[in-house]
Amino acid sequence: MKGARHMNGIKIKDIYAGKPDAKDEINFEGVEEFLEAFVVPRNFDLDALCNGNKFFITGYKGVGKTALLFYLDRLLRNKDEATCTSFIFFKEEFTDLKKSQLDRFSKRLLSSIYIENETLVNNSEFEYIWRWIFFKKLVEDNETFSDGIFVNDRNWSEFVKTVKSIHGPGTSKKYIIPSKLKVSLPISDKMAGTEVAPEINIDLNSKNEEGNLDKFVELVTLAENLLGKVKKTDIPYYLFVDELEAYFGDEQVFHRDLYLIRDMIFTIKRINSIFASAEMNNIKIICSIRTEIVNSISRNIVTKEMNKVVSGFEVPLRWNYDNTNSFSHPILQILLRRITMSEHSDEERNEKKLISEWFPDNIHEIDPASYILNNSWCKPRDIVRLITSAKGSLQNESENFSTAVFLALRKQYSLDSLEEIKEELRALYSTEDIEMIINCFNGFKAYMSFNELKKRVGELFKDTVLDKCFVQVLQDLYRVGIIGNCIPKLNMYRWNYKGDDGIIISDEWKIMVHQGLQAALSLGRRQDHYFRSKQPPQVGDIVTVTIESLNTSFLNVLFMHYGKMQFGYIHISKISGEYIENIYDLFSAGDNLEAKIIEYDKKYSKWALTLIDLPQMEQSVKKVVEEDNAEILGNHSNILEVQKDIDEVEEEVVVDSVCVDPMSEIHCLLKQANVKYQDEEGFANVSAAGSYIKLHKPNFDVNNLGYAKLSKLIEDFPEKYIIKKCRGKGKIEIKVYKCK
């Protein structure tokens, strides 16, 4: 069902989208609009940055680090209107117009840092350069803010004099990391009563200027000692630094930039430590750091314990949220806020009404919040990309986000998402390697085993970085969100951006390409069906089998693999760890069971399988539930409330002991079966649910409840279930259901 039409009649093309980059958004949209649309993650520790000892903001590309710096700026100035703030951005500047607007907006100064092309690394040490630049920034900001940051005493005067004796290219609006600089060393002539300042030229790349370089180091060290002695006024001052980028291109330049970032991080920590030791309150340098840059530094250069420095003083910017299928998720709050801003309405409207007007009840049988989040990486930039894709689609005249709108934007959104992730990988791999890695997944499978992917790499990408560093590449792809882990049959998924650290490499856990990238990579159900249909069943696959016949020691079974009948058997030893006295007491011909493929038995030309032994797991969970939730089980009369508490154990349980009547028991088992067998849209096969009920209640007969078929029982409770028909192989129709 489409969302109800909203009263003001605005269309998707009218929604405020913003820009992927915070600086671009301010340039084109304005600082007020930008701040109005900003949302702070609920788990982000703002107080540690404002009042504590943290000063690094870490996170992946697109999580909103730059945006947070501007938000912090406003927050601190709202707290104390006398606060002075200053920004340093690398390479990319604001337009002159926006710079003047931002400077007028409050006591704020924006500067940029550039790197001279000839500034390359020989000794790989930039710490003294960074100290000099930050000292220079402190001096110039103090002058800009009418000498109000530091007390103008003898120590401050000496600090200023020492810093100004070092000259380099650039102005107060532009700082340049030079290849050469000059040092003026005043020399007093007592006889003449004069003081001269001869200049010493220092070439940072030359090994023939060691003496002059020592003078530079000496002056920076002197300035540092003096900084520890200066006094600060009661006016708060914060310097925000937006991190230098580094991309794997020219190897020499790439390594230079990594050294620069490494030493910038150490310098910021060093200067903040000076402020803290001198008990200078309300002064701090706060810097954003991209996670993949840190990983790249650790991998490519000497780190000097950089990870320890960062982790000890960082506040990670993450958008994890427990209620992941709700519009209360912070990034969906960003979407709702941008819609509200675009409506320009004075009408007070609650969030529920806004959602009902703008979004359908479901998208392909999935609630819209879950659909959006499943196609995102839970980053603010995902919402910008979603709105932008919608505005550019053929459905941009729509007045709500209908299913048709999401279908129309899917391809472009996926392509843009892939390009952004490629940018993230540029801190780790060359452009050629990135394209090769992406091509490995292009048109292959949405879900695959570790061995399937490794086989493909060995056949098509031999001797590449993907082949030589296979596990490392997978770890990197997992970290940036290209792939995740999953066990589809158990509805279990793991993603780095949801807080699941480290990819699991095992037979049980599959590798899954992120849903938001599948359209760009030509993946999905059709593609998976095509590739899987050309392959035989794989060892480790979990399949639903039907018992054809049985004897004292074997279950002879059948199962379908992409339209082709497969023959197999389950030995009595593979049914249960417990002794089975009579197999006929447990099973009958026609029963459907869930089993895992062990091997292909050439002797019998059949697949050997093992029954998935759930009872043991269920009994252990049942014990936990009975011990920890005894009071709950005793007090809840409503069986669905009991089941909710049981589900928190995250395993399946036997429900006989808690159900108050046979029908309630069946509803409980149907709910468990739905969780166990559901597909990505939340639907489970009715036939599989019947087998599940039979497994737990061997004597179950739906006729005893007044129904000819289990599907008829499900249809009779529309308040509990959604049931529909799906096309199977040929003319066969399959009935599936979903719990509400």
Image (spheres, rainbow, N blue to C red):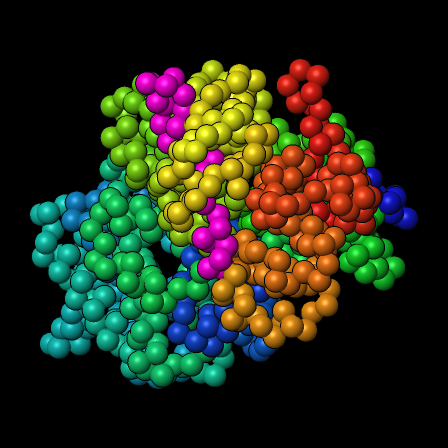
Question: Residue 693, percent across and down?
Answer: 62, 45
At x 79%, y 40%, the residue is 707
Question: Residue 297, percent across and down?
Answer: 28, 48
Question: Residue 134, percent across and down?
Answer: 34, 63
At x 28%, y 25%, the residue is 464
| Residue 417 visible in rendering | no
Q: Which residues are magenta?
A: 595-621
| Residue 269 visible in rendering | yes
215 sits to left or right of 462: left
- Taking depth in this image into account, of 45 and 637 the one nearest to the observer is 637
| Residue 20 lies in the magenta-colored region | no
At x 56%, y 17%, the residue is 563
449 sits to left or right of 104: left
Image position of 281 with respect to 537: above or below: below
- Taking depth in this image into account, of 718 and 396 the one nearest to the observer is 718
Q: Quadrant of the N terminus?
A: top right
Image position of 213 with respect to 542: above or below: below
Image position of 68 with respect to 561: above or below: below
313 sits to left or right of 740: left
Image position of 647 with respect to 452: above or below: below
Question: Residue 698, percent across and down?
Answer: 60, 45
Quarter of the image holding residue 401?
top right
Quarter of the image holding residue 150?
bottom left
At x 43%, y 19%, the residue is 536
